[in-house]
Amino acid sequence: MTDRSPRTPVTLENLRAAARVLHASRCPVVLTGAGISKESGIPTFRDALDGLWAQYDPQQLATPGAFRRNPKLVWDWYTYRRELLAQAQPNPGHRALVELERLLGCLVVITQNVDGLHQAAGSSDVIALHGDIRRNKCFANCQGDPTLIDLSTLDWDRASGPPRCPHCGAPVRPDVVWFEEALPAAALERAFRVCENADVALVVGTSGIVQPAASLPFVAKERGAFVIEVNPAPSAITAIADWSFAGAAGEVLPRLVTALAEWETHEP
């Protein structure tokens, strides 16, 4: 039997056991948080509040009200964050999930991250619950929610703050979910539906405390899914995990994929 303690050693035996579970799955899902992106050198929202930005509270930079009061300040903050992301590349954890999708034939990735690294790595079915910082939309969503705006088609004074929507004249904003905003209804509805139907839930690099995303692993567990956590530190998910591998995504996931590939190659 494998170690079923709250924190599971990353041993070959345990990885092979997890690989057997994944091999038998028909509806696997992955849920990822900031931990997997941090391995690509991307600071968390609060970690990015350094230097000139250390004087600001998140409520001054990431709410609809903050944008109404000072759109240039908020736009400049997100320009700074985008510059931090510009050189970031998918890490071995992201790439391992792409290989896991190939081996299993299907894999839905539900992420709280806004950096687009899962898509950049090649995951084909990503539910981005908190939006995508690489995209922009009309603040008024005048042509539907979201009304995406391609900045390359606009000409504006970049020193003055955000451009204006070419359809209605409202300011353009990042396509991310701010404090005080609801998650995109279609994305959240699908995420819950996927977790309700999942037979295996792989939870990677999330603290499990940001709602409503934090409830998704619990929904999967309540519906009978086998829960596998990968996280260097214990989280709110650890207590419900069947296995909680104590390690970083970029280290554990490639080894898990290797174990799965070997299992499928040598399956009796």
Image (cartoon, grey):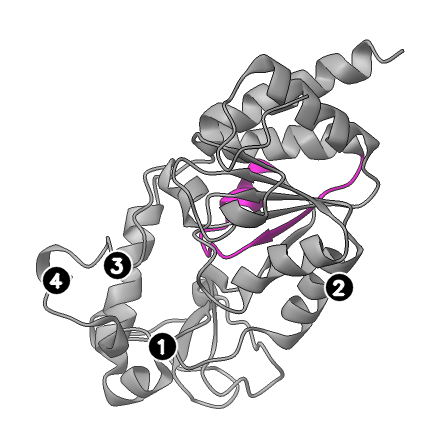
Q: Amino acid at mark 2?
A: Arg
How far separated are the C-alphas under marks 3 and 4?
A: 9 Å
> Who comes first in sequence, dot 2 or dot 3?
3
Residue at screen point 64% across, 69% down: 188
Q: Name the kind of residue labelled 4 in the image.
A: Ala
Residue at image point 76% right, 60% down: 196
The residue that disc 3 covers is 46
Does the CB distance between marks 1 and 2 fall below 8 Å?
no
- Please tell me whether mark 4 or mark 2 is closer to you in this view: 2
Q: Which mark is residue 163?
A: 1
Amino acid, disc 1: Pro
Above or below residue 49? Residue 22 is above
Name the residue type under label 3: Arg
- Contact check, label 2 and label 3, Cβ < 8 Å: no
Neighbor class of circle 1 (other Cα within 10 Å; few <14, some 14-19, many 20+) is: many
Quadrant in which the C terminus appears: top right
Q: Residues within 10 Å of mark 4 (few under 14, many from 20)?
A: few
Per the image, label 2 sits on a secondary structure element best described as helix
Residue closer to the observer: 72 or 197: 197
| Mark sitting on residue 193 | 2
Classify mark 1: helix, strand or loop.
loop
In terms of sequence position, does the residue under pointer 4 or pointer 2 come before the other? 4
Dot 4 and dot 1 residues touching (CB under 8 Å): no
Counting residues from the N terminus, which is met first, the one under dot 4 or under dot 1? Answer: 4
State the separation of the CA atoms marked 4 and 2: 39 Å
Nearer mark to the viewer, of 1 and 3? 3
Q: Which segment is the magenta one? A: 105-122
Residue that mark 4 sits on: 54
| Residue at 24% in and 67% down | 76
Q: Is residue 120 left or right of residue 265?
A: left
